[in-house]
Image (cartoon, grey):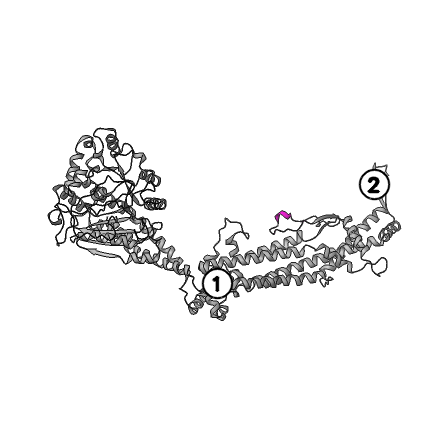
Amino acid sequence: MGDIEEGVVPSEYDGADTLKSDKTPQVGTPATTGDESRSEAMNGDYGNISTDTGGVAKPSSIQMSNYATLARLLTDENREMLDIVTSLARLNIRKSVISLPQLVVCGDQSKSSVLEAATGIAFPRKSGLCTRFPTEISLRRDDIRIVKIQINPHPDTPKFMSDRMERFNAIITDFNDLPRLIAEAQTAMGVGEMKTFAKDVLCIEMSGPDLPHLTLVDLPGLIKNAIDGVTPAEVLLVNELTDEYIKQHRAICLPVISATHDFANQGIVGKVQTYDASGNRTLGIVTKPDKCEPGGGESKAAIALVQNKRVALKLGWHVLRNRNEDETNRNTNIMERNLQEKLFLKSGGWVEVSEEHKGAEALSRRLSELLIRHTKRELPNVRQDVEAEYAMRSRELEAMGKARQDAEACKDFLLDLSFNYDRVCKAAVDGHYEGAFFQYDDTLHFNDNNKLARRRLRAMIQYKNVGFSDMMRVWGRKYHILRADDATANDEPDPAELTMRTECEKPVKRSHDEALDWVERALIRSRGRELHGNFNPLIIGELLWEQSAKWHQLAKEHLNDAFSICTKFLRDLLDVTCPSDVTSRVWTGIFEKRMKAKKQAAVDELQRLMDEIKSQPINYNYYYTDMVTKNRVARQRKLLRDSIENGTTSKVIAFTECGVSHTVKDVDVDKVLDHYTETFGRDVDEYSCEGILDCVLAIYKVHQKTFVANVTTQVVERHIVRGLEDIFSPRMIAKMPDHEVVTIACEPVETKNYRAMLEENVKKLDEGRELLREIVRTTAQE
């Protein structure tokens, strides 16, 4: 469409059948088309208007029969159904969201003859111009003859242009005014002013008693090369626009094919096959059959194509004859055009083609039937899509909350968010996992890489605390001392089974003798003024510090793990409860500073614990003395057993009478005592090292248990987990100054625009829902 020279509004038309009457012409006015032999790079132009008998076209008997067939087809339910689709299209919902059932005329060449044949209307044409934008042509059977024109802006059109287009809305009863209105619509779109082609849709709705109930979308013809003033960007735009329509899975494609060109070399063929390879939603249209030599190769190929023998399409093919040059020059009307077409298609090889697949009148009826069947089949699915899209967009709009323009609105917005946050966060900290936020997938492993697991915050912290305790017990010591007299010394879990990961090195295994050497070296370098045979008590602390050297690193890693889990939990909770545009500002303005303070407090608390570990150990736990006594007694028992074995002699007594012998053991008590005292007191330093090692191992276990308890309760629980719900509490929001509230919560321009778009989408989708509720009654009656 848009084939009117900008600024030119014709007041009358030259030719033998010039329309000059002030009376309202009928929409079915016969008209002529222009020369269709011009460049196929610029196509889709419509012909000048000319009429007979005061602009009134008198239908032939054939046409009357065709109208009667359509009248029977157009029941009230079918009319209502098609009107629903037209109304949905007028809502201008983005095609990527909702695909509507529609007929799309596309091609590489001039399509004016196809539109004329399908609608019975000849549209204005200005030589040298072509269709520059999609045009939706809706025909409706009605007693009143009227033409309505409006523009549906493309969703990507800038708002100032979109507003200008939406203000364009005209109703005419004089068909003479159509060229002027199309020119004005073209100007409103900015075509010729700011751009050459547009994605905005020109909607022309015509009503009349002799019109079929039919809607077609006419697309700009594909441009093969950037010539004749057409830029590469415009070539790409037209291609993208064609793709946008024909890829819709509910669109019926009507590719226009020239009989004079090889089928495979016409660009529209490849495009349609890309999106409809099976041919289930394509009805091919062959034009210019009279340009082929009768009986020649081109003619035979075209006939075979229309007969669905060359390229099989589920919807088949159709052939139309255009006006020839002589008929164009004589401004023949539509009735004569149809008559000449019928005569041609009853000659030569075209006689073999079914009547249903040739001619304008059959095409009009065929398209109407196709549109009704297709719409009836797809509308229930459209309704489901609209409902689903409406629900999704409504949830998204609801999640954005109320518009935030001033401090009061911003504070109300943050208060609403904080109430939701406080409730969910407190439940997670307390371990009350009720509600959709805490739903879990049992097929996933429970670890900190699992978002659903992190949402169950208390369970995850407990899981991490247990992992830290196991790590401290197995990996926390510097030396793993193997003691032959202690059966539990080698009974340790496999480190591979630990849930906590660390960068610390694995404990070094040492035998009992190696451990005594370790203690002896410390004993030598730690001597003070104590008497020989005694040891400096400070050596216990020194060896404890060495044995627990990895505690600080392990505790820091556990602290960081717990902090990371809590941080990710809060970010996830904000993502769920906050609109996306404000999440980062809420986090930066409120959470980040407070979480940083919590971590610093945890680090400081851990440092205080480590300072206590680095001081001389103090113990009042009886477990320490029990362990020391137990180890000492075990060592003495072994020494006593060895001494008894050393002082025991065996003598065999034989009883010859019965042939039985008996072994008698004799224990020399003095020898036993001598061996025991000699061994026990032969090396005072060795005895001291044994006692020191007993003390170190015992105090290590006592302090390890205490350290694990302190880290999990005083560091992780007190400073990281506890009080998470207070970070974003309603009380805190109420105390915030207005300028800080506005900085955090005020909507940016992008969000305002997105909100407006969402509101518009929801409004349109809701209107679509209202329209589609009628389909329930329609399909039920059908």
On screen, residue 487 versus residue 42, left or right, reads right
Label at residue 577: none
Secondary element under disc 2, as helix, strand or loop, is strand
Label at residue 662: 2
> How would you rate the neighbour count of disc 1 (Cα within 10 Å): few for under 14, some for 14-19, many for 20 or more?
many
Whether residue 551 is visible here, answered yes or no, is yes
Image quadrant where residue 221 sits = top left
Q: Amino acid at mark 1?
A: Tyr
Q: Amino acid at mark 2?
A: His
Q: Nearer the viewer, residue 342 or 29?
A: 29
Q: Indicate the position of residue 685 as horizontal and vertical percent values.
A: 83, 54
Question: Is residue 491 in the magenta section?
Answer: yes
Q: Main secondary structure of the magenta part?
A: loop
Q: Nearer the viewer, residue 331 or 538?
A: 331
Q: Indicate the position of residue 127 as horizontal and vertical percent values.
A: 23, 45
Q: Residue beneath label 1, please?
A: 421
* Residue at the spot 36% in from the left edge and 49% down from the top edge: 96
Looking at the rendering, the stretch of residues picked out in magenta corresponds to 489-506
Q: Earlier in the sequence, mark 2 or mark 1?
A: 1
> How would you rate the neighbour count of disc 2 (Cα within 10 Å): few for under 14, some for 14-19, many for 20 or more?
few
Nearer the observer: mark 2 or 1; the answer is 1
Give the alpha-carbon distance from disc 2 to disc 1, as whole Å: 86 Å
Q: Nearer the viewer, residue 181 or 605?
A: 181
Image quadrant where residue 751 sits = bottom left
Secondary element under disc 1, as helix, strand or loop, is helix
Question: Is residue 629 in the magenta section?
Answer: no
Q: Is residue 65 above or below residue 549?
A: above
On screen, residue 73 versus residue 754, left or right, reads left
* Residue at the spot 85% in from the left edge and 46% down from the top edge: 646
Q: Indicate the position of residue 138 as horizontal and vertical percent values.
A: 23, 49
Q: Is residue 265 above or below residue 76?
A: above
